[in-house]
Image (cartoon, rainbow, N blue to C red):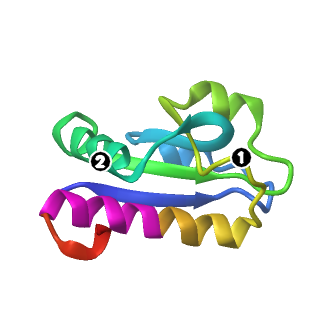
Amino acid sequence: MLRFEVVDVRDGRPFEHHLTGFHVVCLDRSGMALASVDLAAFVREREELSPQRTAFVIGGADGLPPSVLEAAQTRLSLGPATLPHQLARVVLVEQLYRATTILRGEPYHR
């Protein structure tokens, strides 16, 4: 089973040690913007490939530190608009939920 973590880095404390053993996905405006079905394909891929633990990292108002962006295996974008941190979290969770319903063939996506 795929395991997702959402890492909150707004407080400035070191957090990189929490990412050991995870496929790191940074949310960044320079990342790929995926349609829902493409995100579902990404989720399916993460289920099938090692490591199956995936961490989605969301930065604060200043974005993510360059060292974290460079260490990420994947960069995704939620779109060109600037979102408040808490809203970005909600949008990410909804998109992951939508992706899993697509994979299960449930009608939520329609």
Look at the image and give the residue range highlighted in magenta: 94-104
Q: Quadrant of residue 94?
A: bottom left
How busy is the neighbourhood of tag 1: few (under 14 within 10 Å), some, or many (20 plus)?
A: few
What percent of the width, then of the height, locates residue 61? 84, 56
Q: Nearer the viewer, residue 36 or 86?
A: 36
Q: How many marks?
A: 2
Q: Name the quarter where the C terminus is drawn.
A: bottom left
Q: Main secondary structure of the magenta part?
A: helix
What percent of the width, then of the height, locates residue 46? 27, 41
| 90 in relation to 32, above or below | below
Q: Name the quarter where the N terminus is drawn.
A: bottom left
Residue under numbered circle 1: 80
Q: Amino acid at mark 2?
A: Val
Q: Amino acid at mark 1?
A: Pro
Q: Nearer the viewer, residue 23 or 98?
A: 98
Q: Quadrant of residue 97?
A: bottom left
| 19 in relation to 95, above or below | above
Left/right of residue 24 with respect to residue 41 in the rendered view: right
**Rendered residue at 60%/34% (across/down):** 31
Magenta-span inclusion, residue 103: yes
What percent of the width, then of the height, locates residue 60? 78, 57
**Rendered residue at 78%/46% (across/down):** 63
**Rendered residue at 74%/43% (across/down):** 64
Q: Nearer the viewer, residue 22 or 28?
A: 28
Of the numbered discs 2 and 1, the one sitting upstream in the chain is 2
What percent of the width, then of the height, locates residue 38? 35, 42
Which element carries disc 2, helix, strand or loop?
Answer: helix
How busy is the neighbourhood of tag 2: few (under 14 within 10 Å), some, or many (20 plus)?
A: some
**What label sits on residue 43 in the rendered view?**
2
| 20 in relation to 73, above or below | below
**What label sits on residue 89 in the rendered view?**
none
